[in-house]
Image: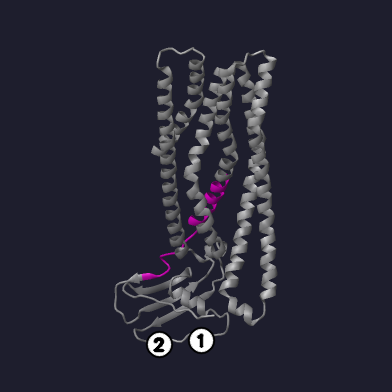
Amino acid sequence: MLSGFFALLKVLTLSTGPIILKAFINVSLGKGTFKYEGYALAALLFVCKCCESLSERQWYFRTRRLGLQARSLLSAAIYKKQQRLSNAAKMKHSSGQIINYVTVDAYRIGEFPYWFHQTWTTSVQLCIALAILYNAVGAAMISSLVVIILTVLCNAPLARFQHKFQSKLMEAQDVRLKAMSESLVHMKVLKLYAWEGHFKKVIEGLREVEYKWLSAFQLWRAYNSFLFWASPALVSVATFVTCYLLKIPLDASNVFTFVATLRLVQDPVRTIPDVIAVVIQAKVAFTRISKFLDAPELNEHVRKKYYGAIDYPIAMNSCSFSWDENTSKPTLKNINLAVKAGEKVAICGEVGSGKSTLLAAVLGEVPKTEGAAKIPQHTREVLVGQGP
């Protein structure tokens, strides 16, 4: 709320410039209302510019700090969620996607608080500028309003395309980062089997797909920027042509006020493409992170911890385990296991027979569909996985 107040104060103080300029011109033409009006206007202009600068700095500082806090919070939440993901969720959210959630999506949501106030301050600034234009050129202001409305309407389909291309770009980036991370993790295997060339072609192909969507997004963004950067010139032409056709007199006061007010129109209009792009990116990022944080987690009730004797730190009775909770064919079926304290147990079997699944079941990482698995409350489990 406080940052919004500073944003509004910045817009209001910025809008006083053309009004004070018009009053200065009237004083120079001998139309002053009191003797020291020029000094009063100079002091008022100084105060307004000081308030504008201070409020803009406060707005920037507070929103950036809020964005940094939001980014840190999301990064921590993503890290904690990644530790509790179920196996089905891990299949949907790869390591490349999770890296993207932290480095790209969380960053874009962190940038959104600053641009959020731009969405409504732009409208307020445009309304104030149009009111000043009406006071300066009268009915010719309507032509300026028509040009601005047409510009915004022409932007609507461009925004939809930008949203589509941004979503496709993030999906392509997820796939590319997944391939990159897997290549780096298993670099030794790639070198031993001389698969570098093949994986290089695969990654380059993924880069081409990502480049295609990135080019499409930036191309439509360039069209959008050109449209809005050209609109101030169109506003000037339309207003002066309307003044000529309607025989509206233009003196020094009106012309200088119009030129100064045009700056108020230029800044918000030219920031509209950036505001739209940031809002679209933040919306896509928020949707992606929300889906990740809502993903199913490991079932805490897979194993039942109890207070009892330590004769059997691990006990399973007629247990069935399945990586897919909804499957009718469990991965492991009718498992009976009792491990005494201090006992060493070797699990032997062929490749793919379920040895790793059994160890994961002991850790509670595989959903249990039948039976009872009990571990004493004070027991701690540690799994030391094999290296590549």
Q: Secondary structure at mark 1?
A: loop
Residue 90 to residue 222: above or below = below
Q: Could you tell whether 198 is left or right of 95 in the image?
A: right
- What residue sits 40% from the left and 29% below the top? 47
Residue 313 to residue 328: above or below = below
Which stretch appears magenta? 280-304
Residue 35 to residue 237: above or below = above
Q: Nearer the viewer, residue 304 or 291?
A: 291
- What residue sits 70% from the left and 64% below the top? 205
Q: Residues within 10 Å of mark 1 (few under 14, many from 20)?
A: few
Is residue 94 in sight in this rendering? Answer: no
User: Is residue 301 located in the magenta-colored stretch of the structure?
Assistant: yes
User: Is residue 213 located in the magenta-colored stretch of the structure?
Assistant: no
Which image quadrant is residue 280 in?
Answer: top right
Q: Nearer the viewer, residue 287 or 298?
A: 287
Which image quadrant is residue 37 in?
Answer: top left
Q: Could you tell whether 342 is left or right of 218 in the image?
A: left
Q: Which residue is mark 2?
A: 344
For residue 348, which numbered disc appears in the image? 1
Q: Nearer the viewer, residue 201 or 55?
A: 55
Is residue 331 in sight in this rendering? Answer: yes
The picture places residue 243, in percent across and down from the top left corner, at 66, 17
For residue 371, which numbered disc appears in the image? none
Quadrant where the N terminus is found in the figure: top left
The picture places residue 332, in percent across and down from the top left corner, at 52, 75
- What residue sits 54% from the left and 66% below the top? 324
The picture places residue 114, in percent across and down from the top left corner, at 48, 43
Residue type beneath disc 2: Lys
